[in-house]
Image (cartoon, helix red, strand yellow):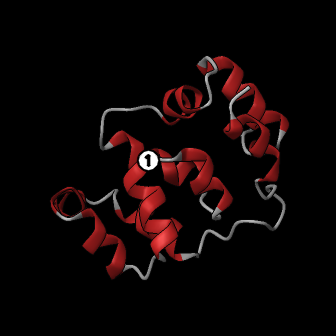
């Protein structure tokens, strides 16, 4: 088991734990706009700074660290906007970072209340 696997249970749970209004979620949501995507890809750190992200949040964004982004209050749907800029599915990258397959990672997030069961 990787260290990240043991830490997944430290992620704040869905109910009242992550605000859609926090800077991290606002920044990720802004990536829906094509011009913002261009600006982000050109200067990711500066773009994050413009939204008031902390150094830790900025590092999580530039590392595309799904679990750290969740721990910092990011919402999975908003994080998916970020990972899609690099042609990556949020489930695939999260699974890869935790030595799991995508289905196992999805199930884990469902069990922890981040995703609705399908």
SS at badge 1: loop
User: Looking at the image, is 58 positioned above or below residue 107?
Assistant: below
In the picture provided, is 38 more to the left or to the right than 2?
A: left
Q: Where does the image place residue 7, in percent across and percent down from the top left? A: 76, 45
- Is residue 56 in view? yes
Q: Nearer the viewer, residue 24 or 6?
A: 6
Residue located 52% across and 66% down the image = 25
User: Looking at the image, is 30 positioned above or below residue 1?
Assistant: below
* Residue marked by disc 1: 64
User: Looking at the image, is 87 positioned above or below residue 52?
Assistant: above
Residue located 79% across and 38% down the image = 6
Residue located 31% across and 33% down the image = 87
User: Looking at the image, is 108 positioned above or below residue 44?
Assistant: above
Picture quadrant of residue 13? bottom right
Q: Nearer the viewer, residue 61 or 15?
A: 61
Residue located 42% across and 68% down the image = 27
In the picture provided, is 18 more to the left or to the right than 63?
A: right
Q: Where does the image place residue 91, in percent across and percent down from the top left? A: 55, 31
Q: Where does the image place residue 62, in percent across and percent down from the top left? A: 37, 55
Can you say which quadrant of the picture contains the N terminus?
A: top right
Q: Residues within 10 Å of mark 1 (few under 14, many from 20)?
A: many
In the picture provided, is 88 more to the left or to the right than 71?
A: left
Picture quadrant of residue 108? top right
Picture quadrant of residue 97? top right
In the picture provided, is 57 more to the left or to the right than 100?
A: left
Task: Count the numbered circles shown.
Answer: 1
Q: Where does the image place residue 21, in percent across and percent down from the top left? A: 59, 75
- Is residue 117 in view? no
Can you say which quadrant of the picture contains the C terminus?
A: top right
């Amino acid at each position: 088991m990787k260290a990240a696997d043991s830490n997944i249970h430290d992620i704040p749970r869905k109910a009242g734990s992550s605000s859609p209004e926090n800077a991290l979620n606002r920044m990720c949501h802004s990536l829906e706009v094509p011009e913002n995507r261009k600006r982000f890809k050109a200067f990711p750190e500066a773009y994050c700074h413009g939204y008031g992200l902390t150094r830790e949040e900025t590092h999580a964004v530039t590392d595309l660290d799904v679990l750290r982004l969740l721990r910092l209050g990011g919402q999975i749907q908003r994080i998916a906007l970020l990972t899609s800029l690099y042609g990556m599915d949020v489930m695939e990258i999260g699974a890869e970072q935790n030595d799991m397959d995508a289905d196992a990672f999805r199930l884990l997030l469902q069990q922890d209340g981040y995703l609705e069961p399908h």
